[in-house]
Amino acid sequence: MDKPSISLCMIVKNEEKYLPKCLSSVQRIVDEIIIVDTGSTDDTVSIAKAFGAKVIQMPWQDSFADARNRSIEEATGDWILWLDADEEMDVDESDKLKELLTRDAVREQRIEGIQFMFWNHLEGGGLEHNYLLRMVRNRPQYRFEGRIHEQILPIMLKFNPRLQLGQVDIHVHHYGYLVKNVVDQDKTRRNITLLQQSMAEYPEYSYYFYYLGVELYRMNELEGALRNINVFLNRAAGLTGKVLVASAHKYKLMILADMKRYHDLIRHSEESIARFPGFTDLYHLRAVGFDALGESDKAMDSLRQALNIGPSEGGYPTRAGCGTHLTCRDLGILYAAAGNSKDADLYYTLASLMSVNTAITFKELSVV
């Protein structure tokens, strides 16, 4: 049985630092590489060509969707895979992708897109993971829209309202959330400008308020961040896509923690947990509020609830270790601060024994 072909489509500008690792991570599994360069002045283009990429020069037009669509116009593969230069697919797992594309659900064209497990590397060595759609069938109807945080799924749903996605635990490492990278490329200011333009062009898309809130949070503009997250949550009350809404609840609690509004943090965390009881990060944030107010017993109880739930399921954007080793570590810290060395040692030991399960799985998801 012939394995389906894959076209890697990317847009880049001045990415000589990250591009070699990105392309190296997938060069064995893709059949062609198409790169749209929007004005690099470093060695990005020569690096891309060294990997055999077809490079298309395109002036930047303040639209990620336009650049994405230009890249996939040239694709000849059965599937379109897109990555950013600061992302790398796990090399040890990437070889399994083509085998997954021979599964019956894919061959019979029940699956129109594939979500991958993304590991977002954070400052201080932390990790946050969630599933993102990064591969779709190469169909002329499937195109991106939006200047920034460009989307392809809404267009796909218009073409096929009952389409299904596949979800695989093949890991993609993303380094763009590291503070030094955001500062180096001045991404946040650019993103805010594009988001404001997009909000005027697509007023029906509530998720732009979410993304603007996130960008402002990264700039430590907490009042503006909270205001936009609240607008999104108010407008998204009827949304069925729970992942983005759950993420907004998490950001709201993080913002309140940074503002030291701990009573509000606890109150809103109760509301968030009631809506997303399996999202263990919310229990951690509630514990932050209790601990800051000197209610260590309640903080410990909140963390024990997270431990009883275990790792978040359902695609929530969860920090690695919430519900497992990170929860045990934080419990150890609280017990040690309370002078209970016996229980502190117990939880520290449990934290050291827990590890992440990296088995590759595949399942079908219904979008509607």
Image: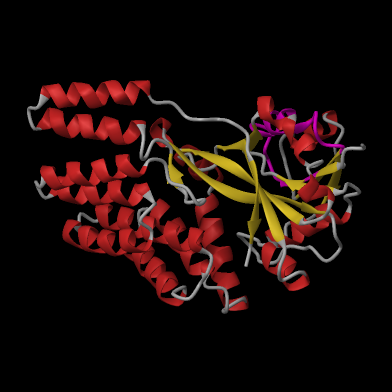
Q: Is residue 207 above or below residue 335?
A: below
Q: Quadrant of the C terminus?
A: bottom right
Left or right side of 50 for 357: left
The quadrant in which residue 174 appears is top right
Q: For residue 340: magenta?
A: no
**107, 91: nearer the viewer:** 107
Left or right side of 70 for 255: left
The quadrant in which residue 26 appears is top right
**265, 246: nearer the viewer:** 246
**367, 293: nearer the viewer:** 367
Q: Is residue 286 above or below residue 327?
A: below
Q: Quadrant of the N terminus?
A: top right
Q: Which residue shows up at 92% across the image and 37% down it?
A: 2
The region drawn magenta spans: 8-31
Q: Which residue shows up at 75% across the image and 54% down it?
A: 111
The quadrant in which residue 6 appears is top right
Q: For residue 10: magenta?
A: yes
Q: How many marks?
A: 0
Q: Which residue shows up at 36% across the image and 21% down it?
A: 353
Q: Report x, y in % for residue 200.
A: 58, 77
Q: Is residue 156 above or below residue 298?
A: below
Q: Report x, y in % for residue 167.
A: 64, 47
Q: Which residue shows up at 7% across the image and 27% down it?
A: 339
